[in-house]
Image: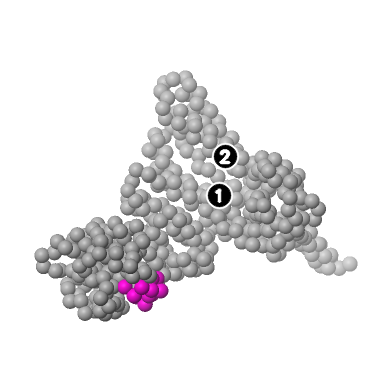
Amino acid sequence: MDKTIINIFIIVLVIGCVLHAQIVDLIIKGSNTVNAKLYSMQGEKTFFVDSIKSTTKDQFNYSFDPTKHHSGIYRLSLSNNKWIDFVYDNEEINIKTTANNIFDSLVINRSESNKLFYSFIKLNKAYKTKTELLQLILARYPKDDNYYKTTQQKLVQLQKEYLEFVNNESQKNTASFIAKYIKSSQLPVVDITLPVDKQLASLKSRSLDKVDFNNAELIYSDAFTNKTIEYLTYYRNPQLPKELLEKEFMVAVDTILNKAKVHQLVYQHIVDYLIDGFKKFGFDKIIDYIVDNYVIKDDLCLDEKTEGMIQKRIDQAKYFKIGSTVPDIILPDSSDNLITLNEIKTDKTLVIFYASWCPHCKETLPQIFALYKKQIEKKFEVYAISLDNKRKDWLSFINANCPNWINVCDLKGWDGKAANDYYIYATPTMFLLDKDKKILAKPTVFEEVKRALAQ
């Protein structure tokens, strides 16, 4: 047989062996279900892959095709609100566990990657708990005491054992997904000889050094999202007022995203996560910061759900910049007289979109009204647009909080023309305009309103 043909045959045979379908065999005793769903994990989000029926009682099989399925973390979700996570890393998998105690009763009969994965999870949990306790002792115990030295030695030993696993034991096959995952997901090891304040500074400057932001494969796991939330905790200070805490988080966001920019998909993945997370905790100013400085500036394509959630933010940031002329507004006041924004002749006009049910509006509008009443000579007017749907709620609010400036409402809520023209996504939203109806400022809190009016 011709040598070339033999070589081709060998190559085809090798490729065929490498790319053959791998069977995932999960046995979950006591699952009491025949139906399950397979999901792919991306950070805190899950994406449906397929439905699976048990082949025999409590046994679920699935055939992974390396040409169709990516490596990463997957989740088998049972119908009784239980699930098991596993790593698909181009190898066959056999895992047994019990439904009542999935994690602790786990037995991995086949799959080196999953053995490493679950060893890493357990090691991380133990390492974090033990090091925090030991560091607490070191922070309070006299340094010249023998117990201090014993504790210090114990902590150093823990760090050594941890690094041995993440840098050596888990890296025997550096091309595997699990090796890359563990290397990027490892917890930071701090130099315990540093003072506490310098340890925090070290974490801020070095804790992201091991994260491979250039590896898009890690999107199919919690590696980037876990490291992101871990890094943000170094900037969290419950003693700070919200305004200062937001500034601290913005510093952290800049560090994370500037590192993530090395790969567009990773960059977008982390931006999605940050926006979603800050939305849950009500940090709207940070979301605006991310939208202005990253989403718009770098023209990012976000997850469809995230983009839908913040599209009005993006549009408002794009079209309502400082110096832009705003669209005219013509709305009825409480006597049904149409009031036109462009006909207001004061040097400055503060446009406020608010609602009677908005907690921040209930706090902010009375403060602005007090400032409004103090004017000896009217230098600014307020054009306050309610997003209420019920006339009774609107009238009750203005009578109690701000009766004497311009109050208008079309009772269409978020669907009104003005709300859509201005891409309103939150209340209160404010625009300070000059006499030509150009934007001077976009204050978000009373102190910013006060400063902008004083300029």
Q: Residue at x 18, y 69 (%)?
A: 380
Residue named by callout 2: 125
> In the image, is residue 412 part of the stretch drawn in magenta?
yes
190 vs 349, nearest the viewer: 349
Quadrant including the N terminus: bottom right
Which amino acid does the dot numbered 2 rest on? Lys
Q: Residue at x 21, y 79 (%)?
A: 343
Identify the image quadrant of residue 361: bottom left
Where residue 32 appears, as percent x and y from the top left, is: 73, 50
Q: Residue at x 77, y 51 (%)?
A: 59
321 is higher (above) or lower (below) than 47: below
**Looking at the image, is mark 1 or mark 2 nearer the viewer?**
2
Relative to 113, is 390 on the left or the right? Answer: left
Relative to 277, is 448 on the left or the right? Answer: left
The part of the chain drawn in magenta is: 409-420
Q: Do we see residue 259 in this rendering?
A: no
Which amino acid does the dot numbered 1 rest on? Ser
416 is higher (above) or lower (below) than 398: below
Where residue 263 appears, as percent x and y from the top left, is: 52, 61
Q: Residue at x 15, y 68 (%)?
A: 379
Identify the image quadrant of residue 66: bottom right
> In the image, is residue 145 part of the stretch drawn in magenta?
no
Where residue 405 appears, as percent x and y from the top left, is: 21, 69
Residue named by callout 1: 184
Who comes first in sequence, dot 1 or dot 2? 2
